[in-house]
Amino acid sequence: MVRTAEIVGAGFAGLTVATELSRRGWLVRVHEAREQVRAFGAGIFLWDNGMRVLAELGALDRVLACCHEAEWWEERDAEGAELGRRPLPIPGGSRMITLTRRDLLVALMGVARANGVVIRTGSHAVSAEPEGVLNTGDGARWTADLVVGADGIRSAVRDSLGLLAGHERFDFGLYRFLVPLDRVPSAGGRWRAYVNYWNREHRRRVLYVPCNDRDLYLLIGAHVSDEALRTPLDASLWCESFPVLRQVLAALPAAPRYDRYEVVRAREWSRGKVAIVGDAAHAMPPTIGQGAGSAMMNAINLARTVDAAADIPAALRAWEAENRTMTERTQQESVAIARDLFPRDEVRRDDWTDGALSIARNVPRAT
Ligand SMILES: Cc1cc2nc3c(=O)[nH]c(=O)nc-3n(C[C@H](O)[C@H](O)[C@H](O)COP(=O)(O)OP(=O)(O)OC[C@H]3O[C@@H](n4cnc5c(N)ncnc54)[C@H](O)[C@@H]3O)c2cc1C
């Protein structure tokens, strides 16, 4: 008999689990609260683990055709002095690419639709029941062999089942936006580096991330109390803090995407026939660029584990047992960096951390 899944959230985790189940013959419906499937947050870093998942789903070629791959990562102070440099790909190790979130989502939507996933937009999940029931805001009750809450950091599915163990927000606020290439005349040729600029006096940061041959992704951040985060953003404050970036910071968008570093810990990743995955289960600060990569890896493994099993609740417990340790190590690593973000005088930043490297080497569960 054909098995069914109701999945909440058409983000990176939800589309991954949906596509993989659909490829295996499940009937899959994704509920997305927004009226359109949209990506927020400008650009994204993906390491090898994320790329391996995309390859398994058949989306990697499309992603590689619209991504950027720099030759090294730099840390610089506000005057432009180098504080560290790390080669890419890591010698003997992993690749890292960047692209716009929109392009990543379009690639995932493409494989989801090609594999028969049905996406119901404007469908707002309010709760789930361990017996395999999803309740949506329009009063509908959807029953399935498997329900998945891939509904992000403020997951309604997770909270309705009492699975939240902890949610911490850090005092660091960030805006993210894309800058068109014509604002960056010096980058007309090849963009060779990703650069983290630090103003240590004012505790401000700019992350400079080429994404393709059109878009530069900028992330600007500071302590949540810093006047530089007040909207409308005052470009002159950022230009004074980072004179070397004056050309790209001279005009800032009126309402870019704002976030803080956050971490979510769940008591368990499932209850009965309901699983939570991605930020709903294990959001982490993006300090090693692994939130989406980990979300997609755990999502594909979830689909493969339940597909191979008759007993869904037992399969979900086995999936958590297999994936949780690696995920928690990654969270710990990203939290430790978030707590000690700014470079210090005496410390150069020339090495990738073990935590970043070990999660990047993770591979999807064999089929
Ligand atoms: C500043 C910042 C930078 C980051 N940079 C990176 C990076 O470079 N690399 C990386 O790997 N990760 C990065 N991350 C983390 C990454 O964005 C997340 O880990 C990733 O988006 C999680 O994917 P997800 O599918 O679990 O959740 P989401 O992307 O949040 O998707 C959840 C989906 O569920 C929908 N939804 C929510 N509630 C409901 C509901 N009740 N009913 C129906 N639908 C619902 C939402 O509309 C959304 O479409 C960054 C995060 C931040 C804050």
Image (cartoon, grey):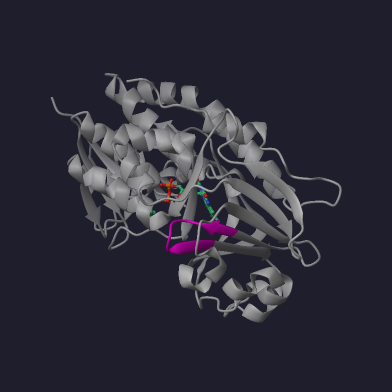
Residue visible at 28% across and 63% down? 35
Residue visible at 27% across and 56% down? 123
Task: Between residue 157 and residue 304, name the one nearer to us.
Answer: 304
The quarter of the picture where residue 78 lies is: bottom right
Magenta stretch contains residue 38: no
- Most extreme residue toward the left is 1
The quarter of the picture where residue 309 lies is: top left
The magenta segment is 208-217
- Judge whether 7 appears above or below 216 on screen: above
Task: Between residue 263 and residue 39, name the one nearer to us.
Answer: 39
Q: Position of residue 254 (x, y in %)?
A: 51, 78
Asked whether residue 146 appears in the rendered view, the answer is no
Task: Between residue 331 and residue 108, name the one nearer to us.
Answer: 108
Residue visible at 53% across and 71% down? 185
On the rendered image, what quadrant is the C terminus found in?
top left
- Judge whether 298 appears above or below 256 on screen: above
Q: Position of residue 359 (x, y in %)?
A: 55, 32
